[in-house]
């Protein structure tokens, strides 16, 4: 299906003499014709940078026709955007097992500098991508690190202008914190639909691949991936809304059956993200929690808040998972875990042993406790699908941060479609700072209703759900500056951008200050 918002990528022919004889032996038959479909319609991406390299990614996906044979894909990395000084090159085979996606773990590069890369296949060149290696692990640099983080981009609710504006900032690194795609769709004819999904709800590998293909063809998403390396984790909509481990949100679904859906969703996630082979899925299991070090400046702890969690507490009488509840015995049960015991231990070790000045925990949700009111009854309670449903995990983590004196702990989060700045506390003592970004397009929670509960939550320093956008961060030795960036209207593909609010966290001082 051709979407009218898809960028019309120019065709750039590769010099025919480059390895033509070897390539033709395994190219798809139609690729030998003069009318080759352009294969790089999903763009390029890079990710998970380390001091000597990064991952580069693409997927061959012609607009018409389907590749059925193995294809040679050549790649090159250069020190200049004209690609005249190539320092690494090679080739990979793209096949049907992983939808002709290509993941190259480039090594042997210099730390802390930019590089440019591209791919060649089927007689065509990919768009140019820019990436950057991390600083050397023992490097103490005065250069500030620029970051961005985004979440919750529902195709049907608008255009991805937030991605375009973040790309224009030329960040060093971008975090995708979940809901990169949406598994579900609005009913046909809904006034919520700005641009429609190609398929309705999805649940198998073909469906998830189709959804990523549609999102990846968005020009603003392609621009962001081509502009900077990224680090991706997931929330729920990459599989199904409010799923938990092996449990579907739909009552009565056999966990064994749901794991088959999860396996399909995880494979499609891997196929479309610049991930290392360490994240290669094995059936329904796929490791995405990991850490990245940026010299002595920062350590990024990237979490998986979905795959390993205990089933949500307070299962409702109709069998539904996740919801607003006043209380139940499970809420504070210390035997329950949101991250899984192995990931919890991994995170504690990484924080305790961190040599970095700043420790950023990048994950998918609002971490701070939030007393809410049921919109129908007005009863106070908590939302059980988030950290409030796993308060024992939060308590263990914050107590560890406090006891271990972790340097400058800051949490990044998403999911809740609104901006938040909070103090994370142990016994009324602030031990960490939290910034949550709004959605790229998805509707925010009701502003007035949430504003009314802020007096019940004095640790919340800022909240706004009326705007769509992203978060920009400048991280230096002495401070972290965070900017909440908002687009004028996500329904407008030419939306402008402005700064809603700025905060500063000073080195050695927990808690955000107005900038």
Image (spheres, rainbow, N blue to C red):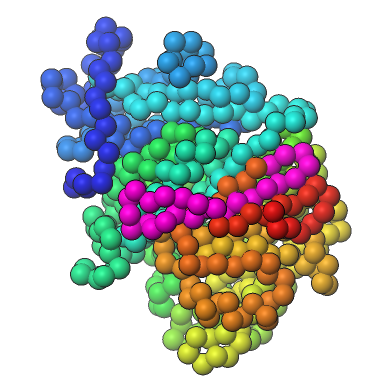
For the question of whether residue 273 can be seen, the reply is no
- Is 348 magenta? The answer is no
Q: Quadrant of the C terminus?
A: bottom right
Q: Residue furthest top?
A: 17
318 and 106: which is toward the camera: 106
Question: In the image, residue 200 lies at what x, y percent?
Answer: 26, 62
Residue 95 sits in quarter: top left
Instruction: Give the side of residue 185 with respect to residue 421, left or right.
Output: left
23 and 18: which is toward the camera: 18
166 and 66: which is toward the camera: 166
Residue 378 sits in quarter: bottom right
Instruction: Give the side of residue 71 with respect to residue 486, left or right.
Output: left
Residue at screen point 31% across, 10% down: 19
Residue at screen point 67% across, 72% down: 369
The magenta region covers 475-499
Say if 107 sits above or below 8 in the image: above
- Is 488 magenta? The answer is yes
Residue at screen point 54% across, 42% down: 174
Marks counted in the figure total 0
Residue 84 sits in quarter: top left
Residue at screen point 56% across, 77% down: 450
For the question of whether residue 353 can be seen, the reply is yes
Instruction: Give the side of residue 2 with respect to residue 257, left or right.
Output: left
101 and 252: which is toward the camera: 101
Question: In the image, residue 405 lies at what x, y percent?
Answer: 85, 53
Say if 78 sits above or below 321 in the image: above
């Amino acid at each position: 299906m051709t979407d009218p918002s898809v960028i019309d990528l120019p065709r750039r022919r590769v010099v025919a003499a480059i390895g033509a004889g070897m390539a033709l032996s395994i190219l798809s038959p139609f690729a030998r014709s003069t009318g080759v479909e352009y294969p790089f319609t999903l763009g390029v991406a890079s990710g998970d940078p380390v001091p000597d390299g990064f991952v580069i990614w693409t997927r061959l996906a012609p607009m018409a026709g389907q590749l059925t044979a193995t294809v040679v894909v050549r790649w090159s990395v250069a020190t200049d955007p004209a690609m005249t000084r190539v320092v690494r090159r090679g080739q990979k085979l793209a096949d049907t097992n992983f939808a002709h996606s290509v993941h190259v773990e480039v090594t042997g590069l210099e730390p802390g500098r930019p590089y440019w890369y591209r791919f060649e296949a089927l007689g065509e060149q990919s768009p140019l991508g820019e990436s950057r290696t991390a600083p050397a692990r023992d490097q103490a640099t005065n250069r500030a690190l620029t970051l961005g983080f985004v979440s919750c981009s529902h195709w049907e609710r608008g255009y991805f202008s937030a991605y375009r504006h973040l790309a224009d900032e030329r960040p060093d690194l971008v975090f995708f914190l979940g809901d990169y795609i949406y598994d579900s769709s609005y009913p046909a004819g809904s006034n919520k639909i700005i641009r429609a999904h190609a398929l309705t709800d999805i649940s198998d590998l073909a469906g998830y691949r189709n959804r990523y293909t549609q999102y990846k063809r968005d020009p603003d998403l392609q621009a962001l991936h081509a502009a900077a390396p990224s680090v991706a984790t997931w929330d729920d909509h990459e599989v199904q809304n409010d799923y938990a481990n092996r449990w579907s949100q739909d009552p009565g679904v056999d966990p064994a059956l749901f794991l088959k859906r999860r396996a399909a969703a995880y494979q499609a996630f891997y196929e479309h993200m610049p991930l290392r082979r360490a994240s290669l899925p094995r059936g329904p299991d796929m490791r995405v929690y990991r850490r990245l070090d940026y010299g002595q400046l920062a350590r990024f702890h990237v979490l998986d808040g979905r795959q390993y969690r205990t089933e949500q507490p307070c299962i409702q009488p109709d069998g539904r998972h996740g919801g607003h509840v006043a209380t139940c015995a499970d809420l504070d049960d210390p035997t329950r875990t949101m991250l899984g015991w192995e990931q919890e231990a991994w995170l504690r070790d990484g924080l305790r042993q961190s040599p970095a000045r700043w420790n950023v925990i990048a994950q998918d949700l609002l971490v701070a406790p939030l007393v809410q009111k049921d919109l129908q009854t007005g009863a106070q309670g908590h939302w059980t699908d988030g950290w409030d449903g796993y308060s024992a995990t939060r308590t263990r983590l914050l107590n560890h941060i406090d006891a271990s004196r972790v340097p400058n702990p800051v949490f990044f989060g998403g999911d809740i479609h609104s901006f938040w700045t909070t103090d994370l506390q142990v016994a009324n003592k602030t031990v960490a700072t939290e910034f949550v970004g709004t959605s790229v397009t998805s509707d925010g929670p009701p502003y007035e209703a949430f504003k009314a509960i802020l007096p019940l939550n004095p640790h919340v320093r800022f909240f706004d759900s009326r705007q769509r956008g992203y978060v920009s961060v400048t991280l230096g030795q002495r401070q972290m500056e965070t900017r909440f960036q908002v687009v004028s209207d996500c329904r407008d593909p030419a939306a402008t951008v402005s700064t809603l609010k700025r905060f500063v966290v000073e080195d050695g001082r927990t808690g955000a200050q107005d900038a």
